[in-house]
Amino acid sequence: MDAFYASAEQASKPSLRGKAVVVGGLGPRGVVATASYEARRFGVHSAMPTAQARRLAPNAAYLVPRFGFYRDISERVMGLLRELSPLVEPLSLDEAFVDLEAGGVASDEVSARAVGERLRADIRAVTGLTGSVGIAASKMLAKIASEEAKPDGLVLIHAGTERALLAPMAVRVLPGVGPATGDHLRRAGITTVGELAEAGEDELVRMLGKSHGAGLYAMALARDDRPVVAERETKSVSVEDTYDVDIHDRTRVRLEVQRLAARCVGRLRASGHSGRTVVLKVRRYDFSTLTRSETLRGPTDDPSVVQEAAARLLESVDTTGGVRLLGVGVSGLADYTQEDLFAQAAGARAAAEAAERTGRADAAARAESADEGQARGAGPDGSLIHEAGEKGEQGPGGPAGAPAGEGVRAERGSGEPPVAPVERRWPAGHDVRHAVYGPGWVQGSGVGRVTVRFETPQSAPGRVRTFAVDDRDLELSEPVALVLEQVPPAVAPEPEPGAGPGEGQQPEAERGQGRGAEPEAERGPGAESGPGAESGPGAGSSVADSSASAASPGGG
DNA sequence: TCTGGGGTCCTAGGACCC
DNA sequence: TCTGGGGTCCTAGGACCC
């Protein structure tokens, strides 16, 4: 999928189509997850600090990711892929390998290309979004082809042309060559894939180690026989938080580690696993990162056992100077279903043994309760497990869970400078519903007010209104589906003459109007602030102005 | 107002075992 | 009683990917 998160937001929010959109962390230490192609023209890209992005593209719309929404779209797309072949290997929400041979849908390059183009059309029809397809004889080459195809294209690498195609390319195109390996190779005078192949396997193994060296040499020769693997088992589960401000108070550090351990176990159990090794991760004020791990005698999914292990690990870490990130993970996973009494007993036994090892009577007591199968409910601070659920894990329960988690996060402030809770309560980009004005989304909030743009994926670009943050008529709501199956659009606020529901269902029609080289110059159809359109704080007279300032807290 | 969060894989040393 | 040669497990760190 092309610029997936940003494209999904643009499809969801008509006023953002054709505009610079940045999705990522909005706090002082946030980074960009995805920038729309319009935003990329300003130099904004993934993994860039959001603060830097704001300097480059101050008028872009800045939105928090809505993983539940993206997951729904992703599942539709993955479903289309599975119609092509049983062998589908997802790499992330927006990318997957498909083994066309195993699917029997293509017998040669002509039919393969036809399958790829039909897939792209289906993706567009089902999601309203564009995707790119790379077709080749191996995973590595298909991935390189898909990168070449972006955005909104298809590239097929003809059999027999692979090596000649790769030779002039930069080594960084190969999977497994990141910044460190890239530098390493450059210092050795190797900058292209052709030079990599010329260096020879022995030389590369000497430089990069056996596995990496041999692997890279094979890739340079376009040799890649890795199979497409549909089901891959999870090997670890982890949770981490970067804090807006470094934590200095040791007591607070301990508290956060307990919370993280509880959240981690919540996810572990939700995935039907238990685990043996507990890992604590600490990033200090100077960005130096260390991990400490402890392997238990047997797997556990008991929150208190993991919490105690994490607490022990923390005691071996010096946190003077401050801590910017804490994380807790569990690896050494075992399948651990609720019904598996044998495993349950084994886990409880292991927990008891682990507790004994440290000579802690209270731990042993809790392990005993686990033995009874009682410890499977909420953790010691059970509400936390549920409320602080992952931003990325909001299930069908809806987006309401995520803001609640954010609220918890914003409130943890004792002993540290307070964190502004504004964009936590009304996260930029989240869907809301107003009792009178209907569905819309949060453009921004601040100084006790929240600015909402009233539009839906199927409507024309909508208008902005501002409310008090505690307005009873306003509530967070489920995301609106991008492409409606049968149901007509819910509410089309202030429709244009002739822009009836039927037309509104065609995303392409609107996109065509909204495209332009300069987002600032764009005005969405029907978006002028006419009479009745309230001006929120910083709301301007055009879509671009108002969306930019209102979606950037403090920016207007 | 530099540098997220969730993962995977690899390496290397030490302990331990046969 | 101048110390081999596997193999596995554990721990810590690092590179890389999206």
Image: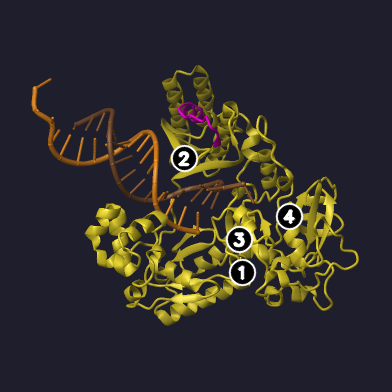
Chain colours: A yellow, B brown, C orange
Disc 2 marks which residue? A289
> Helix, strand or loop at disc 3?
helix
Which of the two labelled residues, at mark 3 and mark 4, occupies the earlier sequence position?
3
Chain letter of mark 2 equals A
Bounds of the magenta span?
A: A310-323
Which of the two labelled residues, at mark 2 and mark 3, occupies the earlier sequence position?
3
In the picture shown, does residue A371 fall above or below A242?
above
Q: Amino acid at mark 1?
A: Leu
Residue A461 sits inside the magenta stretch: no
> Helix, strand or loop at disc 2?
strand
Disc 4 marks which residue? A555
Quadrant for residue A490, please give it.
bottom right
The residue depicted at 64 percent of the width and 39 percent of the height is A386
Which of the two labelled residues, at mark 4 and mark 1, occupies the earlier sequence position?
1
Viewer-proximal residue among A489 and A32? A32
- Foreground mark, 2 or 4? 4
Quadrant holding the C terminus of chain A: bottom right
Query: How many residues crowd around disc 3 within 10 Å: few (fewer than 14), some, or many (20 or more)?
Result: many
Residue A316 sits inside the magenta stretch: yes
